[in-house]
Image: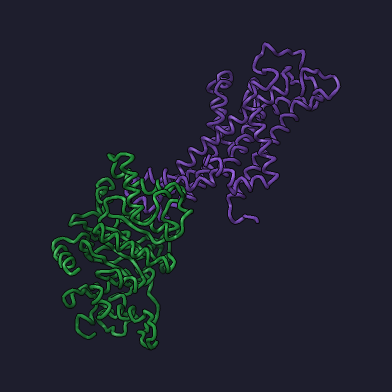
Chain colours: A green, B purple
Amino acid sequence: MDTTHAHNAAASSATPLLETVNLVKHFDISGGLLDRIQWRGSNLEFARTVVRAVNNVSLSIAKGETLSVVGESGCGKSTLARTVLGLYPPQSGQVLYRGERIDNLSPQQMLPYRTKMQMVFQDPYASLNPRMKVREILEEPVRFHHKEKSRSEVKDRVAEVMKQVGVCPDWGERYPHEFSGGQRQRISIARALVVDTEFIVADEPISALDVSIQAQILNLLMDAQEQRSLTYLFISHDLSVVEHISTRVAVMYLGFLCELAPTEELFTNPRHPYTQALLSAIPQLGAPSQDHIRLSGDVPTPINLPPGCVFHGRCPHADKRCRREIPAFLASGDTTLVACHGVEEGRI
Amino acid sequence: MVWLRRIRQSVMLHSFLHDPVAVGSAIFLLFFLIVGFGAPLVAPHNPYDSASIDVMDSEKPPVWEEGSDERFLLGTDAQGRDMLSTILYGLRVSLIIGMGAVALQAFLGITVGLIAGYGGRWVDTLFMRLADVQLSFSTYMIAIFIGAIVKASLGVGNFERIAVPFLIVVIGLAEWPQIGRTVRASVLGEKNKEYVEAARVIGLPARRIMIRHILPNTLTPVLVISTVQVANAIMSEAALSFIGLGMPITRPSLGSLIKAGFEYIFSGSWWITILPGIVLVLLILSINLLGDWLRDYLNPKLYKS
């Protein structure tokens, strides 16, 4: 285990498998022309309403590791995942795969990367086309990317992957609605594995599942990672799962990264005040309840981001500088990156 | 065999068999389809063959009336054509036009709806405003306008030869927004589902995602609307024929038969207009009732125990 980690660290210092540089994704929700007309004073204006879902996110994922992104609902985790895969075009910033820029490629140029990067979705009831048989769902990516493969080769490939994820290959003629949630998620994972996948974005892959099934799917993901040396970008809000599966963890708040650290480091020694609050919210058996850090107020809307550090309104350590200046994402210690003026100044 | 068993065990068949109105209208519709398309085999006379028509036989009443001729079960029209045969041939013409027009509507509506819904932005705006403009004219206005131009430029003789495809095109073009809007609305609902995102992650081109993934999931409402639209198209055709812009009397549809007989209704020959009228009403009614059942069946909110 140690040797593989050392190897990973060496590889990551060369070129990370995937990297985002100052990635920004905004959504314009101002609607049609008529919805945008607004009176301001005596002037007629076309107002634009923009949701700032992902702001200046820079992270890199080394080959073979699992980078988890955690944060509360609406903090931009899923948007980040989809922007990385090119489902949403970013406003600015770059996405690099093995050092090559992929965010500005045409769909045709993107094809070679499509076989390497796949996604597992949250809702197993929505992520499989209800009108296609399981066999068709799984054969489609292989057929599309490997037109040279014969019918029997495609069939063998699909059967092999179905066996690996624990779905009997004989069930291929059935439709998705004939399966349970856990089985569907297995099929969904199989779809991500049938091509020559290296990198999988898993967007809350277990949060829609029954608790008894969650562990199975998690183990399946970890086994697949070991067998195929996969790299995961794992989106979750379940901190205990994240602690179990991740190599490193990134904490997001309102579209900004707060902290990025190796799992053990983050869970034992959280530096960013938001991370500290988040971790103290994990319920623990037998622990006295007054241990929580209670944050005041609500998460501000991503339409009107607060100036300075987006967390300053709820941060117990906020001062003047926090209200004015957006903190940079700086190294703190050997392996941790934190965006906090307090940590930078040594106040916290 | 598996296929057959699946049908026999399906909820749909069960629901169908337990709805007497649906079964009744399906039987009527099936009957009309068989005798309509089988008209050359079923009909006792050929109304298109002018050599077999004798003007001396004109305006004979149906057999149960006085002064009837037993060769003509439902009597004859003003030109001496057997009413039964004429109605059967007319039924065939009406059905062909109704189904052809709906096939064209469905093709246009599905294509436009898919592109508008999936493309979004200005494509969507363009196509939907086009549909709005089209819907703000009545079908008949468009059909009368185009019909008058085509008829004038081709001459009545030539028009007769292209009357069927012409009516299909006119009715098809005039009513596509019904299906187009429905498809667009379903596409908007489907395109943000995760299976579509999964298809995009695979890298499938937009056209393939639209046709293979989204379209099959939007066809349910199209099916319901199409049945009702067949009835509407047959009615439109009948209305256009009634005002003289549809099928010529030499190749009558139900509508042109009603129109032709209308002139004789006050001279006592009621059967020339009433009998095709009854067939038209029954046909439309059975299609609409079947469409209603289909809509109720496909709407899970209306499931009864």
* Quadrant location of the C terminus of chain A in the rendered image: bottom left
Q: Which residue lies furthest to the right in this view?
A: B66
The quarter of the displayed image where residue A41 is located: bottom left
Drawn side of residue B25 relative to residue A180, left or right: right
Picture layout, residue A294 above or below residue A95: below
Residue A41 visible to an observer of this rendering: yes
Residue A236, how many percent across, how many down? 35, 68
Residue A173, how many percent across, how many down? 44, 46
Residue B189, how many percent across, how many down? 47, 54
The quarter of the displayed image where residue A232 is located: bottom left
Residue B118 visible to an observer of this rendering: no
> Depth check: A297 or A284 in front?
A284
Q: Which residue lies furthest to the top in this view?
A: B51
Picture layout, residue B85 above or below residue A42: above
The quarter of the displayed image where residue A185 is located: bottom left
* Quadrant location of the N terminus of chain A in the rendered image: bottom left
Residue at 57% across, 25% down = B163
Picture layout, residue A269 above or below residue A81: below
Residue at 31% across, 75% down = A310
How many numbered tags mark residues here? Answer: 0
Residue at 30% across, 71% down = A244
Drawn side of residue B210 relative to residue A252, left or right: right
Drawn side of residue A110 relative to residue B63, left or right: left
Residue at 23% across, 75% down = A338
> Depth check: A345 or A149 in front?
A149
Residue A18, how many percent across, how many down? 22, 60
